[in-house]
Image (tube, helix red, strand yellow):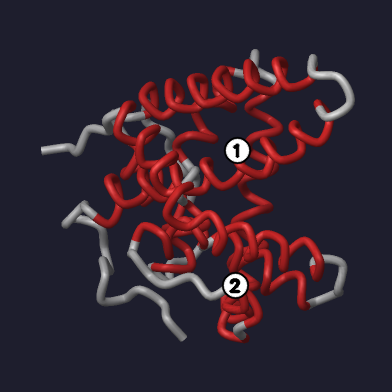
Amino acid sequence: MKTELSVSKVLSDGFRGFKENFLQVFLTYLLYIITCWIPYLNVGTSIAIAVLPAKIAAGERIECTYIFDKRWFKFMGQYFILQGIMAIALIVAALFMLVPAIVMYLAWMFATLLLVTKDMNAVDALKESNAATFGNKWRLFAIIIIYAIIFTIVFAIFSLIPYVGFILDIILGICAAVVQVNMIASTYKTLVIGDDNCPGNDENYVQEGPVVIEE
């Protein structure tokens, strides 16, 4: 039976994860931002930062220096192929009244995670992500909309506060990013890690043709 996401649970997990691992996630993002200007190194760290939700979903201890591990460069070629396919496809899809691009974005949201954690090639990662999100795209969309509404309202309220509103908005932006990565971790844990039919599940987790979109 296909696993169904709980919108309320994902939102709850996002805020609970914020309380449990805020410092680790914040330091990881901060270290990435500080070093992302360094050529070549930024390829490995970008791949590593994309895998952060999977590490949270697996319950791993997050050491912010993990982004410098040389093993991430193993995936560089397939990572660029994946990003190229997604970018071109989403740009073309966006020309058709935007809706197809939204559906494709939701279908492929786990592609990078699967490419690295399951050691898949780019096309297989896209197919597996599409399969994992099948039947849950409207729930994923609802989660994004509710999340956006909540933080947009709070941003607007903080912006009205004289003198300190800008500072509060910066802090809120940091908090929103941490909540978001924990929400992605929750959806990944439910739809991928919890899916016994996912090829290469758990045991292949990395420590050291046209793709059809289904609605």
Pointer 1: what residue? 176
In the shown orientation, is residue 165 left or right of residue 54?
right
Q: Identify which residue, 62 or 5, lies in the foreground.
A: 62
Which quadrant: the C terminus? top left
Q: Hey, what amino acid is under mark 1?
A: Ala
- Across and down, in percent, residue 82 comes to 59, 56
Q: Identify which residue, 106 or 97, lies in the foreground.
A: 106
Residue 165 is labelled as none
In the shown orientation, is residue 158 left or right of residue 10?
right
Which quadrant: the N terminus? top left
Q: How would you rate the neighbour count of disc 2 (Cα within 10 Å): few for under 14, some for 14-19, many for 20 or more?
A: some
**Residue 202 vertical placement versus 3 (above, below):** below
Q: Identify which residue, 203 or 104, lies in the foreground.
A: 203
Q: Quadrant of residue 68?
A: bottom right
For marks 2 and 1, the one nearer the N-term is 2
Q: Identify which residue, 196 or 185, lies in the foreground.
A: 185
- Across and down, in percent, residue 178 comes to 56, 47
Q: Hey, what amino acid is under mark 2?
A: Cys
Residue furthest out toward the left: 1
Pointer 2: what residue? 64
Q: Secondary structure at mark 1?
A: helix
